[in-house]
Image: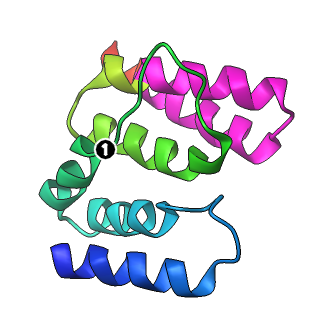
Amino acid sequence: MDEVLEEIDRLETKYQSTDTSAGTGQAAMANIWLNTGKPAAALQWARQQPVGLESKLSISKEWSYLVLAQVHLAQQEYQAAIDLLERLLEQASQSNRQFLVARSAALLALALYRKG
């Protein structure tokens, strides 16, 4: 698994022109692991993602936040998913990022439903 993440980092460095999408490849890989029955690998990735509750979420990491919320849902960590998604939804709404609003709202609805 570490070799895959290192290769993703290498390819991102080689092909991206800015650092605004740094880590997106790893988030995409975590998403693939989550959706192909390898939640342990996705969870390992998620544990390495720093998301401080006191700071504003970085717009360059919005894909990572969505994947992180999905990992929380898969682990039945509903409140963690809700907390993250509420912040992401608020920020996306303020910056008029419609795809992010729609995706965050859908995941938040799912988290709230599963939490009961």
* Residue found at x 54% / y 87%: 14
Question: Which quarter of the image is occupied by the N terminus?
Answer: bottom left
For residue 95, above or below residue 27? above
Q: Nearer the viewer, residue 43 or 16?
A: 16
Q: Quadrant of residue 101?
A: top right
Magenta span includes 32: no
Asked whether 81 or 10 is in front, the reply is 10
Badge 1: how crowded within 10 Å, few (<14), some, or many (20+)? many
Per the image, the residue denoted by label 1 is 71
Q: Residue at x 55, y 52 (%)?
A: 63
- Helix, strand or loop for disc 1: helix
Q: Quadrant of residue 98?
A: top right
The furthest residue to the left? 40
Q: Which residues are magenta?
A: 82-111
Residue 86 visible within the image: yes
Q: Is residue 1 visible?
A: no
Residue depicted at x 75% and y 47% = 99
Q: Return the x and y of residue 114 as percentages of the image width and height.
A: 34, 24
Q: Measured along the vertical axis of the image, is residue 34 above or below residue 108?
A: below
Q: Residue at x 36, y 69 (%)?
A: 29
Count of picture labels? 1
